[in-house]
Amino acid sequence: MNEKQREGAAETLRGALVIVIAGALLGLGFNALALESHPRRGLTWITREEKMPSLEELQTSPSATPDTSARGPASSLTPAFGGGGGLLVLAVCSPAPTRYVVASAADSSHARAAAHKRAAKKVTKKATGAAAKSASAAGTAAPGAKAASKPAAPAANPAPAPPSATKTTLPTVPDLDKPIEVKLGDVKKFFDAGPAAAVFIDARERSEYAEGHIKGAVNLFYDEVVAKPELIAPFKNLGKPIIAYCSGGDCELSKDLANTMIDAGIRKVLVFTDGLPAWKAAGFPIETGAAER
Amino acid sequence: MGVLASPLLRRGAQIVLGLLFLTASLAKIVDVASLAREVHNFHLAPLWSEHLLAMVLPWIELLAGLALVLGIRPRAGAWVAGVLLVVFTIAVASAMARGLNFHCGCFGTADSARIGWAKLGENVGMIVLAAIGSLKPR
């Protein structure tokens, strides 16, 4: 390597260092500005372990004040859920004052069988119709419902109320601006409470969904949401928790989908981290078949 | 080597790679929170450093892209891009080897590609561009 070559290499190295150092300074400076902005943006300087809050812990934590979070200040941040469409109401009875009670008779376990029969047919129905139906049942407008036409939508319309309907107590889902981890036991409670209690979303690919999914779950593949963010529009203003799941273990699809939904302003987004394997292992209802598109 | 040393090819490779880097960096800068999440998904960097990486990486990509496109120290830009791409490729391969399956975030949230062979091939293609772009002019 002669003198000229060495000089050239040194110059390239210097240039590369300038790019790296200037880039790093710009990045840090931009983040500092973002942190000072209103509303506050930017990332914290040091990453802290941010475990998803668990629904179970939120039930026992004294700081959990679901009655106010559901209808109080938080709802002003997310007016979509403030009204709740009448699907979820707060219990006023003393034994479980901080828990939602699905008062609609359609949500009772008696109604579930009938609802699921219908849900099995409707579950993969296109978003527009079903979400609009949901909103109509709730007596509220679902702004996103008409806009979207592709994704499968929740089978939100419950069966007509049988006179003998009983109340089902469900865990409270606070209006957090982050996904909440939910375990099998609580997932089953929502499942048993019927389609009006929660929407189950399978975040896996269509082919995986077709091979088997939680009965009544709709298919919303995360990658498709990334490509077409409007696909989550029908899930706004549902007024009930959304339970996203995928294959458990290292599967990140449900978490990614949940975060995307949170970023879009949707609240009460639960992630069933153990996913389908745990559901199957427990012998809970599974159904097969592709989503209608 | 003769063809690769062609000034036209070198400049073309620099511009294409530079545009790719500009696109990727801008998409990441506008949604740095998502990038932080993608960095976390790889489970490679120490937890405390993930946000710092997410803050800094897109800006380095941006400057490397600008250097390549504008032709200001383009070889330096190509070297930086090449080194970044090698690191990204190792990260993708490592994630694949561990059976992880998540959204890559390589081009911000607009990119729905997941880590996998296609992403690996894409990176290798860009490494080739970086190698051509970093060749010394005669």
Image: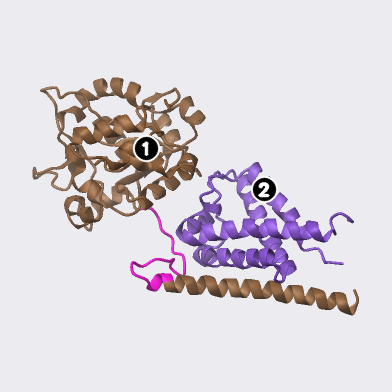
Chain colours: A brown, B purple
Tell me the SS state at disc 2.
helix
Residue B19 vs residue A133, the one in the foreground? B19
The answer to which quarter of the image holds residue A218 is top left
Say which mark, if any, is on residue B122.
2
Q: Position of residue B13 (x, y in %)?
A: 74, 57
Is there any visible trace of residue A1 in the rendered image?
A: yes
- Measure the C-alpha gap from mark 1 to mark 2: 32 Å
SS for callout 1: loop
Q: Position of residue B111 (x, y in %)?
A: 54, 48
Q: Residues within 10 Å of mark 1 (few under 14, many from 20)?
A: many
Residue type marked 1: Ala
Q: Relative to A86, is B62 above or below?
A: below
Query: What mark, if any, has residue A148 been given in the picture?
Result: 1
Please provide percent x and percent y for residue A274: 42, 40
Q: Where are the magenta residues, as a range?
A: A34-52
For badge 2, the amino acid type reads Glu
Residue A154 showing in the rendered view: no
Q: Nearer the viewer, residue A237 or A241?
A: A237
